[in-house]
Image (cartoon, rainbow, N blue to C red):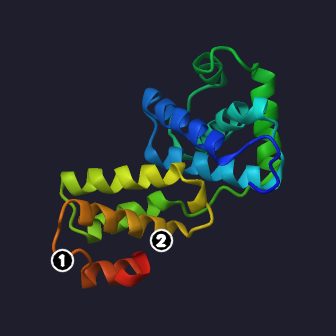
Amino acid sequence: MGSQTEVNPKMRAILIDWLVEVTHKFELMPESMYLTIYVIDRFLSLQAVPRRELQLVGMAAMLIACKYEEIWAPEVNDFISIADNSYSRQQILSMEKNILNSMAWNLTVPTPYVFLVRFAKAAGSDKELENMIFFFAELALMEYGLVTVRPSLVAASAVYAARCTLKRSPIWTETLKHHTGFAEPQLL
């Protein structure tokens, strides 16, 4: 976010919080939300965005992610409606094109979600542990300081934090070490 003059980490967190709500409202898959946030962060690292266009970037990023991940993606009009008609169809589609061109259409990337599913299974998760893992992972999405951290480490840390919170013993097993590639000291 170093190239941003008008957008700061707090604004990013507010946008992501709103997009999490949109994800639930549209009943989107978690993969779409994680890819949306990757697209936003990647675009913000490539281009300066005026504050007034941050929500537009978020909507266009989610539209892109939904087209990539969902079987039935929300339509542009759905995004116009959910943003109280703040942007036109043309603005959203133009931003979508700008983002895709800036990223050279590279959307096949590992997000924390890919690792979360695998690591939760390796942790032998029950519903309580799984919910806690995804809760911590969602919190991590808001934290700008974690943008440059490898998605696998973010996911492993979410599993570790969840197991600590729920007082699972042992906190970090050999199975988790094997599947995540991280030893317990790397997660502290």
Q: Quadrant of residue 5?
A: top right
Q: Which residue does the image show at 29% across and 61% down from the upper left? A: 162
Report the side of 75 relative to 177 (left or right): right
Report the side of 176 relative to 98 (left or right): left
Residue 30 vs residue 135, the one in the foreground: 135
Q: Is residue 104 visible?
A: no
Q: Quadrant of residue 130?
A: bottom left
Disc 1 residue type?
Pro
Report the side of 109 relative to 31 (left or right): right
Q: Can you tell which mark lies on residue 170? A: 1
State whether residue 69 is above or below residue 181: above
Pointers 1 and 2 in contact (C-beta within 8 Å): no
Residue 181 x/y as whole percent: 42, 82
Q: Can you tell which mark lies on residue 117? A: none
Q: Which residue does the image show at 72% across and 31% down from the upper left? A: 56
Q: Quadrant of residue 94?
A: top right
Where's the C terminus, which quadrant?
bottom left
Where's the N terminus, which quadrant?
bottom right
Mark 2 secondary-structure assignment: helix
What distance separates the C-alpha of mark 1 from that of mark 2? Answer: 19 Å
Q: Name the N-terminal-most of marks 1 and 2.
A: 2
Residue 109 x/y as whole percent: 61, 62
- Count of all numbered marks drawn on residues in the image: 2
Q: Is residue 45 visible?
A: yes
Residue 35 x/y as whole percent: 57, 50
Residue indicated by mark 2? 153
Mark 1 secondary-structure assignment: loop
Q: Which residue does the image show at 77% across and 47% down from the upper left? A: 100
Q: Which residue does the image show at 35% across and 81% down from the upper left? A: 184
Disc 2 residue type?
Leu
Q: Label 2 crowding class (10 Å Cα cut-off): few <14, some 14-19, many 20+?
A: some
